[in-house]
Amino acid sequence: MSDQKALDIRFILLALGALALILVSSIATGSLQNQPRYIHHLNHFSSAGGIKAPTNATVSVNAETGKLAMQEFSEDCPPPKAALIGVMTTTSDASSNRRNLLREIYRNANPSPTDAEQIDFVYVFGNGKSWEAEYQLTMEEIAHPSDTIITEREENMNDGKTYDWFNLSRGMLYTEHPVRKNEFCLRYRFVGKTDDDAIIHVPRLSKLLLQLPISESHFVGRALDFYMTGMLYLLSADIVEWIHTSPIPAKNAVGHEDMQTGVWLQKGLPKADIKHHDQKELFHDLEESHNVPRHRSHDKSIVIHWCKDIARFFRCYGDLYGTPPSALKRLTTLNSLKLHQKRLKGKLPSLVEGGLDKELKLTTDFNIATQLDAVMMKPLVEKIIPTLVKDEVTKLDLDMILRHMAARVDWLKENELTHAVLRAIAAMESQASDSHWETAVAHKLKSAIDETKGPLTWAQVKKIRS
């Protein structure tokens, strides 16, 4: 055997020996046990480093009444923050883009980190299904160690990720007493779940949560049958503690992600007197969504969902927080307006280009994206409306029609423009109309116009619409 081969063999043996020592040490310390990866990163949750929580359960179920009873915490504990919310996200490009924006939106929207109105956000991943995803997760941990949570379960929607989040969140629910050792205080009043294609108005949500009595059990969200839809829902601390300690949620972890949360409460706490707070139109999808909770955005909206692409994401943000001056300045430059018009021209070839040097009357109270689309489509729509309605069309009427169409601009086609106007007329008095209903009414309006061989009065429109 040559000296070089002998040297290579000795090197391999030394490397294997070192690896064996690492493995033995890891097993001895428990670091290779099935522990969630987030424990090593969310050190800011404890001044001493690492996450600490009571060893024993802090909640019990009364055998006679079935109600939850949570232990009382010391009066000299600092007031708990409003909520901790886990944002369900993935390593896809679209999710990553939204997640990076959400981090800054929520950072800027929150009050002081020590304020009782504070809502903290963490971003919840499943383990990677490919080597590329594993590298993406690794970079998330490196770049954002304080708010990245990676469950041991593979990335999924309906195979237990929601349960994993609420189960793990128990470790962040408490904080050590500022003076006395081995004593804990409640860190959060609520723990919630949301998606990365939803945007939350933090101050409005915080105000809502702080109005609810801390001594009662709460389930807050947008109700759909016996559960809350996944755009955003929150559970009071006692329910989160119960999820961690009861075998029922773990046994029913797999199933429709948000429906299962309702299943846990139905099976495990049927008599717990949990207060269900259905937020109705305060929690909603964008108005053009195919989902039931769709609604037109308004100045009391708390969360808007279905913000999937960058244009819709901007709309959700603008409708909740208003359009910032920087966005108004950029999107109304001549170059930006030309690009905007070019996009519309691709969908509506008869759109007349130019006229962009006129003063634009835009409000920054909500997003300006739909306003820009409405302004540019206005000449086309104004030509069509007299063929459909013979009565006066007020500025308010026209604004409602244009806003409806602008929200659905992605689906507009030149040869279906009249139908789109009729759909908008059908939806004028509705904040949350269904596309199938709009289409049905539009066809009836068109049939009536064909039968009368001319435009309709508003009275005729209203009769058909009703």
Image: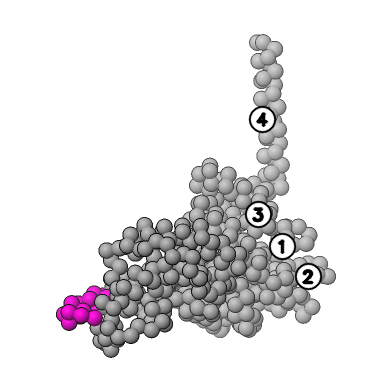
Judge left or right: residue 463 versus residue 118. Answer: left
Q: Quadrant of the N terminus?
A: top right
**Residue designated by label 4:** 16
Question: In x, y percent, where is residue 466?
Answer: 29, 85
Q: Main secondary structure of the magenta part?
A: helix
Pick whichever, 56 or 81, lies toward us.
Answer: 81
- Residue at 56 percent across and 69 percent down: it is 323
- Residue at 59 percent across and 76 percent down: it is 205
The correct choice, above or below, for 40 with respect to 441 in the image is above
Pick whichever, 299 or 3, lies toward us.
Answer: 299
**Secondary structure category for the residue under label 4:** helix
Question: Which one is in front in this view, the residue at disc 3 or the one at disc 2?
Answer: 3
Question: In x, y percent, where is residue 221?
Answer: 51, 75
**Gap in angstroms between the C-alphas marked 1 and 3:** 14 Å
**Residue designated by label 3:** 144
Is residue 458 at least partly visible in the picture? yes
Question: Which one is in front in this view, the residue at disc 2 or the one at disc 4?
Answer: 2
**Residue designated by label 2:** 177
**Secondary structure category for the residue under label 3:** loop
Question: In x, y percent, where is residue 62?
Answer: 59, 80
**Mark linked to residue 45:** 1
Q: Residues within 10 Å of mark 1 (few under 14, many from 20)?
A: many
